[in-house]
Image (spheres, rainbow, N blue to C red):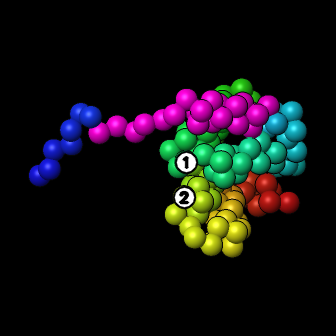
C-alpha cells in the first residue's frame, strides 16, 4: 500500500481564490435578489450564471469551491436548511461537467455546450429527488408546473 506524503496538497493561487470568492458572492447576490419563485416552492436562481462563469475561468478545484460556497451561503441566507445537502450536491454536479470540459476538452465549444446542458439536467434531477423525498410525488409534480 502506497503512503501519501504530507506534502501532497492542492495549491491554490491568490488570483484564483479571489476570483472564486467574487463569483461566489455575485452568485449569492443574484440568487437572492433576482430569484423567480416557483408556484409549488423553490426558485430559479440567476446566480448559476456566475457558477458557469467560474467553471469557464477557474481551474477545477476552484470552480467547485465557488459552487460549494455559493450554494451553502444562498441556502443559509434564504433559510432553506432542509435543502442544504441537496444544494451542495446539485451545485457541484452543475459545474463539474463544464469545468471538466474546459480542463480536459480539446473541442471546447461543442463540449462546453453539452456539458452545460448535462450539468443543468443533473442539478434539476438532484432537486427533483429532494422534492420527491420531502414532498412526495404530488409535491414533486406541483413544483414542475
Q: Position of residue 88 (x, y in %)?
A: 57, 43
Badge 1 vs badge 2, beta-carbon distance below 8 Å: yes
Q: Nearer the viewer, residue 76 or 21?
A: 21
**Could you tell me residue 51's position as x and y percent?**
69, 46
Identity of the residue drawn at 70% across and 31% down: 22
**Residue 69 position within the rendered picture, expressed as x and y whole percent measured from the top left:** 60, 34
Q: Is residue 28 magenta?
A: yes
> Which residue in the protein does label 2 denote?
103
Determine the residue positioned at 77% across, 48% down: 49
Q: Which stretch did the figure color magenta?
A: 8-29
Tell me the crowding category of disc 2: few under 14, some 14 to 19, or many 20 or more residues within 10 angstroms, Cα based: some
Q: Secondary structure at mark 2?
A: helix
Q: Bin the neighbour count of mark 1 within 10 Å (Cα to Cα): few under 14, some 14-19, many 20 and up.
A: some
Q: Please name the predominant secondary structure of the magenta segment in the image.
A: helix
Which residue is tagged 1? 59
Q: Is residue 137 above or below residue 23?
A: below
Q: Residue at x 85, y 60 (%)?
A: 145
Q: Secondary structure at mark 1?
A: loop
- 17 or 134, which is in the foreground? 17
Using the numbered discs, state the Cα–Cα distance from disc 1 to disc 2 in whole angstroms: 7 Å
Specify whether residue 74 is in view: no
Query: Is residue 106 visible in the rendered structure shown here?
Result: yes
Q: Is residue 44 above or below residue 11?
A: below
Task: Indicate the quadrant where residue 54 lies.
Answer: top right
18 above or below 48? Answer: above
Q: Is residue 93 magenta?
A: no
Using residue 55 as the reference point, say whether residue 35 is left or right of it. Answer: right
**Picture coordinates of residue 136, whole percent (x, y):** 66, 55
The quarter of the displayed image where residue 137 is located: bottom right
Instruction: Name the residue nearer the viewer: 82 or 71.
Output: 71
Residue 40's disc number: none
Sequence order check, earlier mark of 1 and 2 = 1
Amino acid at each position: 500500500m502506497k503512503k501519501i506524503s504530507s506534502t501532497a496538497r492542492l495549491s491554490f493561487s491568490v488570483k484564483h481564490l479571489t476570483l472564486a470568492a467574487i463569483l461566489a458572492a455575485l452568485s449569492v447576490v443574484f440568487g437572492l435578489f433576482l430569484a423567480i419563485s416557483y408556484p409549488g416552492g423553490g426558485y430559479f436562481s440567476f446566480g448559476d450564471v456566475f457558477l458557469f462563469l467560474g467553471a469557464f475561468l477557474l481551474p477545477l478545484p476552484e470552480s467547485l469551491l465557488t459552487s460549494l460556497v455559493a450554494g451553502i451561503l444562498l441556502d443559509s441566507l434564504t433559510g432553506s436548511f432542509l435543502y442544504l445537502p441537496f444544494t451542495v450536491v446539485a451545485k457541484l454536479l452543475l459545474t463539474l461537467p463544464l469545468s471538466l470540459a474546459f480542463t480536459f476538452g480539446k473541442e471546447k465549444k461543442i463540449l462546453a455546450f453539452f456539458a452545460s446542458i448535462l450539468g443543468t439536467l443533473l442539478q434539476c434531477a438532484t432537486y427533483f429527488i429532494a422534492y420527491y423525498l420531502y414532498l412526495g410525488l404530488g409535491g414533486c409534480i406541483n413544483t414542475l408546473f
